[in-house]
Amino acid sequence: MDEIKLSAHALNLYFGNKKILKNINIDFPKNQVTSLIGPSGCGKSTLLRSFNRMHDLSPDARIEGTLKLDELDIYDQKNSVTEIRKRIGMVFQKPNPLPKTIYENLSYALNIHKFPKNEIPQLVESALKESYLWEEVKDELKKPAVKLSGGQQQRLCIARTVVLRPEVILMDEPCSALDPISSHKIEELIMILKKNYTIVIVTHNMQQAQRISDKVGFMYLGELVEFDTADNIFKNPANELTKNYVGGHFG
Ligand SMILES: Nc1ncnc2c1ncn2[C@@H]1O[C@H](COP(=O)(O)OP(=O)(O)OP(=O)(O)O)[C@@H](O)[C@H]1O
Ligand SMILES: [Mg+2]
């Protein structure tokens, strides 16, 4: 049996009076990669963002149900959002480095979270190594991060997430703004990172989902239609909608 790291139970999410997520029940296994797939607008990003409380700032968002990280209730108001986001990191579609140096992109969060000052250089170096960026940037850590290529910026954003030693990494289409070679590097990185982290990724790239996923959830119109091993979803889906979607016959 898989050990479950992150889960949603009876999750409904509304924006105003529009119901966007409909009774989602999902378990993400620890140290695995789970992909969320489905047509545009079906609620993949909304589901992903609900796990690190990104909707807290949307006044018209309303959430019902239970979301858990291990046994921790993510929406229990006594748990601080900062602490939740340290444990559940997020990487976005468009690389979004801070307008600071490469080094400061990582040290900034470490300072906010009050890591001991003398440990920071070593933590920055380890995170850059873990994200396979170190060799490319070790001689120019004082360069503005925005001068890196798009693929390097995305690996920097991953480094910025792993430097805080999260338990879960959420990724919303992390490769969609990248060329095939940079995308491939991120995919390889994801395969390595899963040894230490639980990864949930949204992707529109079915080949990518097949290559990197242990589990796959297919969403449609705010519902989780099917959740299974990547092998079953792509080779032997139980649901006709899933079959049409992964087969490219949708619309
Ligand atoms: N902040 C918001 N306020 C109101 N409606 C929203 C908000 N964010 C998303 N929605 C709506 O929620 C639905 C799901 O959007 P979501 O971004 O989760 O889809 P998605 O599956 O990630 O799509 P895509 O593949 O295009 O990224 C859409 O109808 C969208 O218009
Ligand atoms: Mg989206």
Image: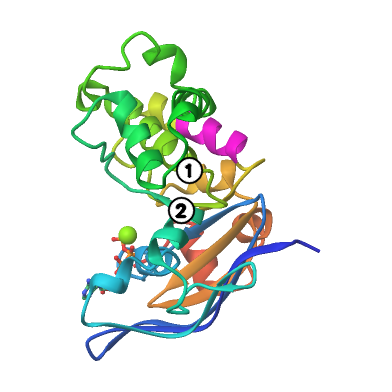
The residue that disc 2 covers is: 86
136 and 113: which is toward the camera: 113
Question: Magenta residues, as a range?
Answer: 185-193
Pinpoint residue 1: horizontal percent, then vertical percent. Answer: 81, 64
Outermost residue toward the right in this view: 1
Left of 206 or right of it: where is 230?
Answer: right
Q: Is residue 182 above or below residue 200?
A: above
- Report whether residue 227 is seen: yes
| Depth order, front residue of 194/21 | 194
- Tell me where residue 96 sits by quadrant: top left
User: What secondary structure is found at the residue carrying circle 1?
Assistant: loop
Q: Position of residue 250 (x, y in %)?
A: 39, 65
User: Which amino acid type is marked by label 2?
Assistant: Lys
Q: Earlier in the sequence, mark 2 or mark 1?
A: 2
Closer-to-camera residue (236/110): 110
Determine the residue positioned at 46% across, 77% down: 78
Question: Measuring 76% from the left and 61% from the top, which residue is drawn there?
Answer: 2
Q: CA distance from mark 2 to mark 1?
A: 6 Å
Q: Which mark is residue 164?
A: 1
